[in-house]
Amino acid sequence: MNCEEATKLMDGYLDSELDPITSQKIEQHLRECPKCDQAYKIHGSLIRVIGNATPYYKVPAELREQIQSSLRDAVGAKDKGGSGQPGQLSVPRPQGERRPVLSQVPWNWLALAATIMLGALITAVFLPRMRPPNADQFLATQLIASHVRSLMANHLMDVPSSDQHTVKPWLDAKLDFAAPVADLSSQGFPLIGGRLDYLNNHSVAALVYQKRKHFINLFIWPTTPEDSTAQTMVEREGYHLVHWSDGDFTYWAVSDVNPSDLQNFKQLFEQQTARH
Amino acid sequence: MALPLKAAHASETEDFESSRNIVKFTVFKGSDQNHAQKAELASFEEALLPHLDAAHNLARWLLRNEQDAEDVVQEAYLRAFKSFGGFHGSNGRAWLLTIVRNTSYTLLKKNRAADLITTFDDEIHAPGHESVSPATILENSEDAELIREAMDELPAEFREILVLRHQEGLSYKEIADIAQIPPGTVMSRLARARGKLKEYLAARIGKEK
């Protein structure tokens, strides 16, 4: 397979929609061609992050109720021999009667003006809903983006060291808090370095651990009142996020390792830091 | 007042007596129908109300306007209910989204034919944003408002395919069914849509700088 073919099939590969033989051919090409491999990684993370951050317009509660009630009305209309026109509501609404979407009624300026007013009103009311549904999800998106960025921009570590006594003082000097650092190499999660990062409007410590070929970014910052203290495990677009808190600090581990490894990592880290 | 009422009542009773069978028949038929329809409504609601968010999200992205989206969703649910008897599949979401999509396009065609034409905006495609690197795009890619603006600039067929894949996570096969395109076209259209979205994002980021 050449680069042109690989580029053409990249989206299908990314979406796991190719047949096994073609997938293998692409995999082989990506192993051999660093240029395509790089392009694939960048394209993939961009698509994931953009997909996650695209606003999802949930249905307003009022519309849900309205649809349920108009379905009941439709049942009622059928009872009466289906006298109602298709798509038209059989029971008049007390106020703000709906414009039948595909009605034969011609537009008139008054209706247009009213629609614009209503549209503006509804936009004003529902605009806040377009934001990502909640702060936690927004944080998760940020965490994944940060994790992906650290892997792709050659900026995984500011202080590459497997020695916790090197990483910790380096971080302490750069941050206004002393983040706990644990070495878990004997348990299969070697510490490979540390980094400064910026999340949720404050500087945070990022510890980088390795599990086989995968990296785990552990983000640590002092717990603020907005941080939830509940333990959570989130899966998004193939990444796993584990969150916990020990009172002083809030932890978020992000990785593409499997959930049980990540859970295991969390427990080991907790045990190690609890002793200090 | 009391006397005429009584008289009327008496005559009604007589009528009722004389045509008892017919009356009874009508009443029974009505209540059977009622039961059947209530059951149908219940199974319709169970199958399709869980996809209200998906329906609304797709309509909202296609029409780019809340009022139109709400009208379309309502219309689509009524249409779906009317043809529910013909639905025997297991994929209620894809079936509903097809109806939402078709209803949205009918409205788009009617009101804003211009929307359906793939526009090529000179301002957006002006040279100069090539310098915006993927890393810079990624840094800005959590900005929901920026993404919304860039998405809204895409032609409807691109908005639709991005929503179906990225937000609903549908397979190429399902997308082909909903968008009514050959399965072989899904990948290339998706690639073009993603490319354009990245381009528009880069252009917006470049302009802000």
Image (cartoon, coloured by chain):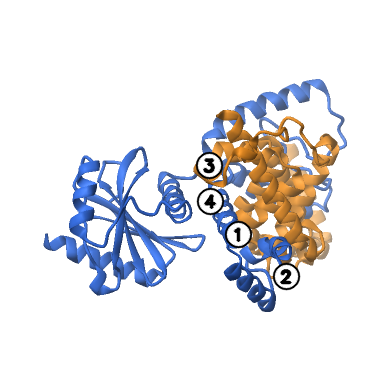
Chain colours: A blue, B orange
Depth check, mark 1 against mark 2: the one in front is 1
- Tag 3 secondary structure: helix
Badge 2, how many Cα within 10 Å: few under 14, some, many 20+? few
Q: Is residue B19 visible?
A: yes
Name the kind of residue labelled 2 in the image: Gly
* Residue at the image point whose x is 62% and y is 57% from the top: B168
Task: Tell me the tag on residue A35.
Answer: 1
Name the kind of residue labelled 3 in the image: Thr
From this view, report whether residue B52 is shown above or below residue A198: below
Q: Quadrant of the C terminus of chain A?
A: bottom left
From this view, report whether residue B62 is shown above or below residue B25: above
- Tag 1 secondary structure: helix
- Tag 4 secondary structure: helix
Spatial CA distance of label 1 from label 2 is 44 Å
On the image, numbered disc 4 is attached to which residue? A49
Spatial CA distance of label 1 from label 4 is 21 Å
Give residue B6's position: percent from left, percent from top: 72, 43
